């Protein structure tokens, strides 16, 4: 199997290296062969080529069986609102050009981490839901977007077609069928025309999944309920921008953003990445939590290669490292381990 | 002073009645005269006139010195995505026609309620911030919005002008000057053109408020930080949709949505309302928490009439009722009081 590696910016390279170590350990134990091809993305790619998602990177992604991605983003671009090229454009172009329309983010509590979550134990213990976030539509990509000629007015467009809604909805309903059979559509149908199309389309599709109970929730209410009653959720389906917000919000449940993996699925490609971002303040210090990247490698094995046992072994190793208190400083205040040590423990 | 009363839908009438009682108690004690004029809005107005914000209501609002508003919304409209007239349209039309461009929502923890918040006590104790949400622009009102001719594509537009950003920013900076002098702009400048205009404009304006420290936060990150470190925030400034989401999210800090008041400020009018919404399941049962409405009346006294002492007396009475365990069932599980009893306690 060929895996494209896009380590990206900030702590991306450090955590990706640990995920590759975990993949290699699995390959050795189970007798698989994984071949890796590294390429540039984000600020690193801008520095080298002027393009945050160079053609060579796109080719490498398209010819791979799966993509393992680190992180993107650099503060030198964030603080310049008029920068012509920004690292994030590379991420968005990649999602669009590879057709990665469904971002899947599991959210669960870890018993070992209950003490470090800002939420009370009885609220989060046992939480287990998964968010399906639409990733290639909505206000992230809609046209027109930009400035009026005098520069005094700015505009963005949120656009959704029925087809875009349908394809991710089918994935979400199928996931619900294999879980607790509950699907919650998060939208703002009391205000947005796009949300009303979502509601209408999802309602239509639901007749094909009679075992799944469907309900609707306004995004403002969902932002509250995810904190108040996270155990109530099973599969959450939502559009791009709402998904961006509520998945990061939901990360507080696990206790650390550094833990959470994600999968971005398309018809031809699939990409796996920790949700934590480039965290530039930590880059090069050896303090970054590699578990989000390692769990992303576990998702890669499960979703891209259908290697369930191999995937589970990685997840178990991560749970063991947390139980053993073998973790980076975002999780383990006393006697924290460094990035490499945590990766080594998981490998072992 | 003339106060327009728009009780609205669901629990709106019940909680508004208690807020009026509190205003009357203040009037009597301090020798003020408040005159009330009630009018229709929302589903109640649709039922009576076919229009969720009738002209008579608009006139009443425009001729009043302040507006006290209950809630809007009815599930019979929510579940019909194609309903031609919806109660929420009345709310949005009211905001737009009265020019209520700044929604101000204070968020703080109540010591008596620390046990019922889903967040841990050390996280929230001492939280005290205020969100300035832009209320008459952005994706709530931008044109074009609607459907393609074949009905298979939907679109919404997010539009902001520099002027719209400036006027609310000045209010937020002034509030920060009177508080802990920190302002956080929440946006998505790494993706949205409108957010980049926000960032640019707010940065320009900040030079007029040299004592206020300004920082920027992406909305996904903010959704996380509000739960992790709510005490870090002082004044939060944001656009309409992001404000909708993060203010409801932030309500978990206080322990109950039922507690939170808000002010919507314009150049000519100002409106005060609890943030809880119409909560139709509770309507008519006497279980609705009136404290959000009562605290909205306190905000009315402070913001619209500059009656600080009178406002403070109401706030103290609310804190006392919480301390005494004299509260509705959303807060007080054992031996809860009903809506009217809580209102009576505050009045006393
Ligand atoms: C970096 C940014 C453009 C991106 C997004 O908003 O999608 C990130 O927040 C994410 O969730 O992957
Ligand atoms: C009812 C709805 C249209 C409204 C909004 O989204 O603004 C509500 O959620 C609010 O925050 O006042």
Image (spheres, coloured by chain):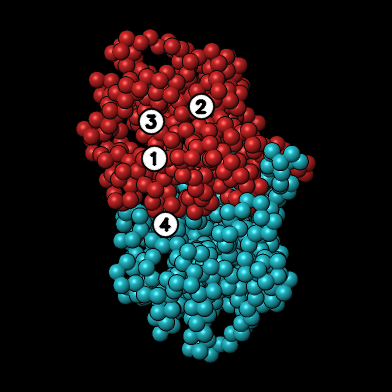
Chain colours: A red, B cyan
Q: Which residue is mark 3?
A: A292
Q: Nearer the viewer, residue A201 or B170?
A: A201
Q: Is residue A146 left or right of residue A60?
A: right
Give the quadrant of the C terminus of chain A.
top left
Is residue A31 visible in the rendered structure shown here? Answer: yes
Looking at the image, tell me whether mark 1 or mark 3 is earlier in sequence order. Answer: 1
Closest to the camera, between mark 2 and mark 3, is 2
Closest to the camera, between mark 1 and mark 2, is 1
Instruction: Give the spatial CA distance, label 4 vs label 1.
Output: 26 Å
Q: Which residue is mark 2?
A: A265
Residue A230, label in figure = none
Q: Which residue is mark 4?
A: B252
Looking at the image, tell me whether mark 1 or mark 2 is earlier in sequence order. Answer: 1
Residue in the image at 62% along x and 69% along y: B44
Give the quadrant of the N terminus of chain A.
top left
Image spot of residue B348 (x, y percent): 40, 85
To the question of a shared chain for discs 4 and 3, the answer is no
Q: Which residue is mark 1?
A: A180
Q: Nearer the viewer, residue B330 or B243?
A: B330
Image spot of residue A282 (x, y percent): 40, 32
Q: Tell which subunit mark 2 falls on.
A: A
Proximity of marks 2 and 4: CB atoms separated by less than 8 Å: no
């Amino acid at each position: 199997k060929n895996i494209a590696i896009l380590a990206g910016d900030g702590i991306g390279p450090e955590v990706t290296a640990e995920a590759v170590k975990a993949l290699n350990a699995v390959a050795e134990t189970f007798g698989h062969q994984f071949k890796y091809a590294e390429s540039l993305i984000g600020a690193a790619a801008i520095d080298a080529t002027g393009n945050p998602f160079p053609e060579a990177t796109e080719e490498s992604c398209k010819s791979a069986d799966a993509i393992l991605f680190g992180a993107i983003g650099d503060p030198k671009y964030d603080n310049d609102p008029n920068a012509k090229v920004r690292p994030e454009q590379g991420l968005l172009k990649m999602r669009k050009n590879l057709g990665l329309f469904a971002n899947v983010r599991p959210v669960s509590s870890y018993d070992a981490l209950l003490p470090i979550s800002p939420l009370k134990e009885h609220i989060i213990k046992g939480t287990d839901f998964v968010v399906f976030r639409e990733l290639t539509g909505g206000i992230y990509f809609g046209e027109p977007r930009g400035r009026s000629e005098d520069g005094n007015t700015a505009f963005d467009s949120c656009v959704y077609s029925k087809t875009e809604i349908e394809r991710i909805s089918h994935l979400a309903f199928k996931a619900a069928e294999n879980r607790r059979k509950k699907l919650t559509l998060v939208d703002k149908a009391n205000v947005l025309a796009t949300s009303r199309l979502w509601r209408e389309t999802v309602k239509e599709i639901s007749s094909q999944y009679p075992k799944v109970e469907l309900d609707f929730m306004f995004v403002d209410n969902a932002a509250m309920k995810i904190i108040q009653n996270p155990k109530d959720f099973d599969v959450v389906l939502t559009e791009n921008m709402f998904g961006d917000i509520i998945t990061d919000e939901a990360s507080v449940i696990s206790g650390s953003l550094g833990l959470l993996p994600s999968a971005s699925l398309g018809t031809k490609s699939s990409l796996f990445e920790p949700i934590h971002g480039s965290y530039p303040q930590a880059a090069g210090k050896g303090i970054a939590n590699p578990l989000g990247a390692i769990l992303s490698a576990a998702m890669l094995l499960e979703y891209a290669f259908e290697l369930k046992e191999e995937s589970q072994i990685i997840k178990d190793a991560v749970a063991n490292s947390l139980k053993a208190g073998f973790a980076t400083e975002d999780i383990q205040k006393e006697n924290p381990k460094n990035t490499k040590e945590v990766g080594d423990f998981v490998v072992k």
